[in-house]
Image: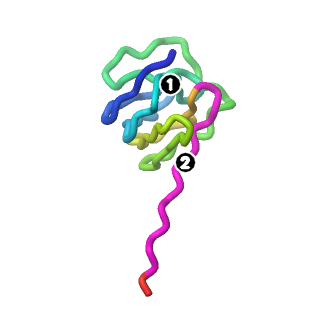
Amino acid sequence: MSTLVKPGTRYKSTVCDTEVIIVKPSSGPIDLRCGGQPVVEVGAEVPTGLTLDSAFSGGTPLGKRFADPESGLELLATKGGAGSLSIGEVPLPLKDAKPLPSSD
């Protein structure tokens, strides 16, 4: 399921407690997943019978940003959970923190 994500849109996992908000949209439709299963918009009905894929069970920490340099997608975890974020089968990496300027 590929969707076009928009800034400010909130998504939740269908297999754990993870919730995210889109900070920067992707350049096109993407297959955003958590725990190996597609995410749904907050407020949408969650499909039943889905389970957490052990290959995507590394967890999503609260307050961390994730970014995909290829698509331009950037999101923020607003609620942590057991599932790992991915675009399709490709894990979504944590965004590197910007170094602070030196205070010489």
Q: In the displayed structure, does residue 47 sit left or right of residue 86?
A: left
Q: Is residue 99 above or below residue 68?
A: below
Tell me where residue 3 appears, x and y as whole percent. 44, 20
Residue 91 among magenta residues: yes
Residue under label 2, please give it.
94
| Numbered tag placed on residue 30 in the rendering | 1
Tell me where residue 44 appears, x and y as whole percent. 34, 17
Query: In the image, which residues are magenta?
Result: 88-102
Quarter of the image where one finds residue 19: top left
Q: In the displayed structure, does residue 94 sit left or right of residue 101?
A: right
Q: Residue at x 49, y 59 (%)?
A: 97
Q: Residues within 10 Å of mark 2 (few under 14, many from 20)?
A: some
Residue type marked 1: Ile
| Numbered tag placed on residue 38 in the rendering | none
Given residues 27 and 49, the one toward you in this image is 27
Residue type marked 2: Leu
Residue 85 among magenta residues: no
Residues under numbered marks 2 and 1 in contact, where contact means CB atoms less than 8 Å apart: no
Quarter that holds the C terminus: bottom left
